[in-house]
Structure formats: structure tokens, C-alpha cells
């Protein structure tokens, strides 16, 4: 899976870089630990990107509250 993680990490980085050129600020949520570790090993810099462990947490930081199902 290392090759797949490398491809995914590069694709995410390229997408975020392209969006940044267009003036769009990106947020990442729910990245698998393997992809995050591969990104670090590849030297990809995501320091300018907002990151969150879950989509719910990312939306909450943007002021969007989700209703909990009972």
C-alpha cells in the first residue's frame, strides 16, 4: 500500500496547491494515518492547510452544527 499512499499524498498536495492558486483555502479531514505519514516522509508541506480529524470537527470549526440522530 506504500505506493498507493504516495500517489494519494501527491494528488492531495497537487489539488490543494491548484486550489490555492485559484484563491481557494482548503481544509483536510479524515486522512488515514498512513497517508499522513507518507506525506511527511515525502516532505510535503501542509502547514498552510487547516486539518481536522473528522468532517464533523472541521464543520464545527466553521460554525456549522450538525444535528445528532437519536
Image (cartoon, grey):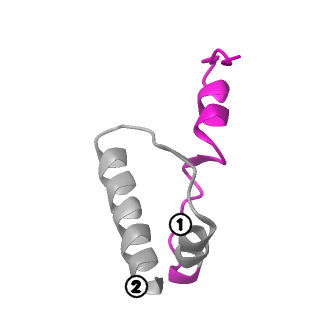
Residue at point 39% right, 78% down? 4
Give the side of residue 27 with respect to residue 64, left or right: left
Task: Please state the horizontal and vertical placement of residue 39, each as a whole percent of the image.
Answer: 53, 73
Q: Is residue 1 magenta?
A: no
**For marks 1 and 2 on the same chain, the one whose residue lies earlier in the sequence:** 2
Task: Please state the horizontal and vertical placement of residue 52, each as a whole percent of the image.
Answer: 64, 45
Residue at point 61% right, 75% down? 37
Q: Is residue 47 magenta?
A: yes
Residue 59 placement: quadrant: top right
Q: Is residue 6 above or below residue 53?
A: below
Please provide the residue range marked out in magenta.
Answer: 41-70
Q: In this view, does 15 lie above or below 22?
A: below
What residue does disc 1 label? Answer: 45
**Dot 1, crowdedness within 10 Å: few (<14), some or many (≥20)?**
few
What residue does disc 2 label? Answer: 3
Q: Is residue 39 above or below residue 1?
A: above
Amino acid at each position: 500500500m506504500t505506493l498507493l499512499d504516495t500517489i494519494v499524498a501527491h494528488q492531495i498536495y497537487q489539488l490543494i496547491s491548484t486550489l490555492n492558486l485559484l484563491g481557494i483555502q482548503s481544509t483536510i479531514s479524515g486522512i488515514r494515518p498512513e497517508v499522513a505519514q507518507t506525506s511527511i516522509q515525502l516532505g510535503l508541506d501542509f502547514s498552510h492547510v487547516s486539518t481536522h480529524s473528522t468532517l464533523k470537527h472541521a464543520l464545527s470549526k466553521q460554525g456549522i452544527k450538525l444535528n445528532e440522530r437519536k
